[in-house]
Image (spheres, helix red, strand yellow):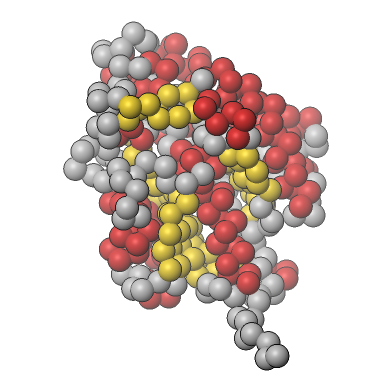
């Protein structure tokens, strides 16, 4: 029997470039207070958000994915034709068909490449990044554009205080390519899983008041308790799988769900040996919760602010509806 011919595997994968985009419109807590029963102090104390970006009806999810993806390709020093696979992590497409990835790839100029969406909600970017790294490592893809893009404003009841104050719009992207050798591998193994017994804690209800005809609902306390107790162990597992210790982590970038959750995860990691000078992403303060876009948005913003530097060790961990979770350690490009 003749053996199949397989693509030659490589040592591993690394991030080659980043890009992000947000809508122009800034919505403050005071702006929301003009519509619903809330105020700036109440929102800051509960979720840590000061402002968020909301897209107009004319700006689509694919528009934002395209902008962020094109920026990441340019940042990697590549042309669109150098990319052969596009993955869009999203849970807010207005329709299930066609997917976002094929449309996004075409707009960027990535012709005839593999293109598919991943829906793991707020864990989506980490799921997609892990998938991209494995595709590259196995030789199935050479360079993969990974995009987290959400237009959550379409899926909100803007009179529901429990969700309207939290969610926002935006997109972030990374290009993943092969590492030259074992020493230059820049994406660690993915530590992922799900808690399907809590699937109904975050869901979509039929609601004509939203643009999409359905509105996101969540059991806030259930999600908060789960995230503050279960996500730090996932992060620690990702560190261990990469052959590192918590003290090796320079920067922590958890999903920007709630500033209290972010701080709780950081505190638990420090109890397990993470350094006090470990920098922690707090992009939620001015970006809100952008689901699968939040981790790449935070990374790109931290780079712009000089809070993360090339070669540093960064821990990513996403979590959300499903309930799904995933994390990995990366070297910042």
Foreground of the two, 165 or 101: 101
Residue furthest out toward the left? 58
Q: Residue 74's x, y, as percent? A: 39, 65
Residue occupying image coordinates x 68% and y 57% = 188
Residue occupying image coordinates x 30% and y 16% = 159
Residue furthest out toward the bottom? 2
**On the rendered image, what quadrant is the N terminus found in?**
bottom right
Look at the image and tell me whether residue 22 can be seen. Answer: no
Query: Total number of numbered labels?
Result: 0
Residue 53 picture quarter: top left
Asked if residue 98 is positioned above or below residue 282 in the image, the reply reads below
Relative side of 192 to 213, left or right: right
Foreground of the two, 200 or 163: 200
Residue 104 picture quarter: bottom left
Residue 132 picture quarter: bottom right
Residue occupying image coordinates x 66% and y 34% = 231
Relative side of 231 to 290, left or right: right
Relative side of 240 to 68, left or right: right
Residue furthest out toward the front? 1
Residue occupying image coordinates x 43% and y 24% = 217
Look at the image and tell me whether residue 213 can be seen. Answer: yes
**On the rendered image, what quadrant is the C terminus found in?**
bottom right
Q: Residue 76's x, y, as percent? A: 46, 66
Q: Residue 182's x, y, as percent? A: 73, 71
Q: Residue 4's x, y, as percent? A: 64, 85
Asked if residue 223 is positioned above or below residue 11 in the image, the reply reads above
């Amino acid at each position: 029997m003749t053996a199949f011919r397989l693509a030659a595997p490589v040592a591993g994968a690394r991030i080659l470039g980043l890009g992000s985009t947000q809508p122009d419109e800034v919505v403050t807590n005071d702006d929301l207070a003009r519509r619903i029963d809330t105020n700036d102090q109440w929102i800051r104390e509960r979720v840590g958000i000061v402002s968020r970006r909301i897209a107009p009806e004319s700006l689509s999810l694919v528009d934002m994915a395209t902008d962020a993806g094109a920026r990441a390709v340019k940042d990697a020093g590549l042309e669109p034709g150098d990319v052969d696979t596009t993955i869009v992590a999203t849970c807010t497409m207005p329709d299930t068909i066609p997917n976002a990835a094929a449309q996004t790839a075409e707009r960027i100029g990535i012709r005839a490449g593999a293109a598919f969406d991943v829906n793991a909600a707020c864990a989506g970017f980490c799921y997609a990044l892990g998938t991209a790294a494995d595709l590259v490592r196995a030789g199935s893809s050479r360079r993969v554009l990974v995009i987290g893009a959400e237009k959550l404003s379409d899926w909100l009841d803007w009179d529901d205080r429990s969700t309207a104050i939290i969610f926002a719009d935006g997109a972030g992207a990374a290009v993943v390519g092969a590492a030259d050798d074992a020493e230059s591998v820049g994406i660690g193994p993915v530590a992922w899983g799900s808690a399907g017994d809590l699937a109904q804690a975050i869901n979509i209800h039929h609601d004509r008041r939203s643009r999409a005809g359905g509105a996101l609902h969540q059991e806030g306390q259930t999600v908060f308790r789960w995230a503050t107790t279960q996500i730090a162990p996932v992060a620690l597992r990702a560190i261990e799988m990469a052959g590192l210790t918590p003290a090796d982590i320079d920067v922590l970038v958890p999903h920007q769900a709630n500033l209290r959750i972010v701080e709780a995860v950081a505190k638990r990691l420090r109890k397990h040996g993470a350094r006090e000078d470990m920098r922690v992403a707090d992009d939620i303060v001015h970006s809100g919760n952008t689901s699968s876009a939040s981790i790449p948005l935070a990374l790109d913003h931290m780079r712009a602010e000089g809070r993360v530097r090339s070669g540093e060790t960064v821990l990513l961990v996403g979590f959300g509806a499903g309930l799904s979770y995933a994390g990995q350690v990366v070297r910042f490009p």
